[in-house]
């Protein structure tokens, strides 16, 4: 089952809801990042939340993700878009595992 990505505002109200593709491309890309990368810590079978401070740190890591396929490019773009919306909302990025 693919993971969901929820953008929350500062009061944890849902702003946007995105879904990873059926192959969990975004999760797989994040899991393949270096151990020091925050996105590698996204938990597949539970929830992972990033706050405003962590979102700033993630931005640099997103730019460094190497993509090899169109699906990977779309997954990284989805992550960029979700992260951008969360920053504008001064909120949170929640990854909901299965």
Image (cartoon, rainbow, N blue to C red):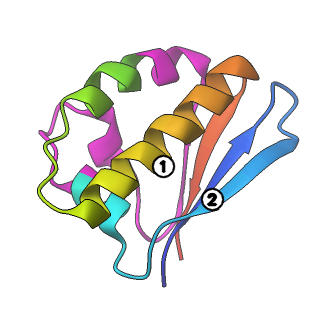
Say above or below: 10 vs 50.
above
- Determine whether label 2 and label 1 are within 8 Å by CB: yes
Q: Which picture quadrant has residue 92? A: top right
* Residue ID at (63%, 59%): 18
State the separation of the CA atoms marked 2 and 1.
Answer: 8 Å
Residue 8 relative to residue 50: left or right: right
Is 84 one of the magenta-colored residues?
Answer: no
Residue 30 relative to residue 69: left or right: right
Residue 5 percent across, percent down from the top left = 59, 55
Residue 33 percent across, percent down from the top left = 16, 44
Residue 67 percent across, percent down from the top left = 16, 50
Judged from the image, the secondary structure of the residue bearing numbered disc 2 is: strand
Residue 79 relative to residue 10: left or right: left
Q: Which residues are magenta?
A: 30-56
* Residue ID at (88%, 29%): 11
- N-terminal of the pair, mark 2 or mark 1, is 2
Q: How many marks?
A: 2
Say above or below: 67 vs 3.
above
* Residue ID at (11%, 56%): 68
Q: Which residue is mark 2?
A: 18
* Residue ID at (37%, 72%): 24
Judged from the image, the secondary structure of the residue bearing numbered disc 1 is: helix
Which of the numbered marks, if any, corresponds to residue 92? none
Q: Which picture quadrant has residue 71? A: bottom left
In the picture, which quadrant includes the C terminus?
Answer: bottom right
Would you call the spot at circle 1 few (<14 residues within 10 Å), some (14-19), or many (20 or more)? some
Would you call the spot at circle 2 few (<14 residues within 10 Å), some (14-19), or many (20 or more)? some
Is 55 one of the magenta-colored residues?
Answer: yes
Say above or below: 64 vs 65.
above
Residue 22 percent across, percent down from the top left = 43, 82
Q: Which residue is mark 1?
A: 78
């Amino acid at each position: 089952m693919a993971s969901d990505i929820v953008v929350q505002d500062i009061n944890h109200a849902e702003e946007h809801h995105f879904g990873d593709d059926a192959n969990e491309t975004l999760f797989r890309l994040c899991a393949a990042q270096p151990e020091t990368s925050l996105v590698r810590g996204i938990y597949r079978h539970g929830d992972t939340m990033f706050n405003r401070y962590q979102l700033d740190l993630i931005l640099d890591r997103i730019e460094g993700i190497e993509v090899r396929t169109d699906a990977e490019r779309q997954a990284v773009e989805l992550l960029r878009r979700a992260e951008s919306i969360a920053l504008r909302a001064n909120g949170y990025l929640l990854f909901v595992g299965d």
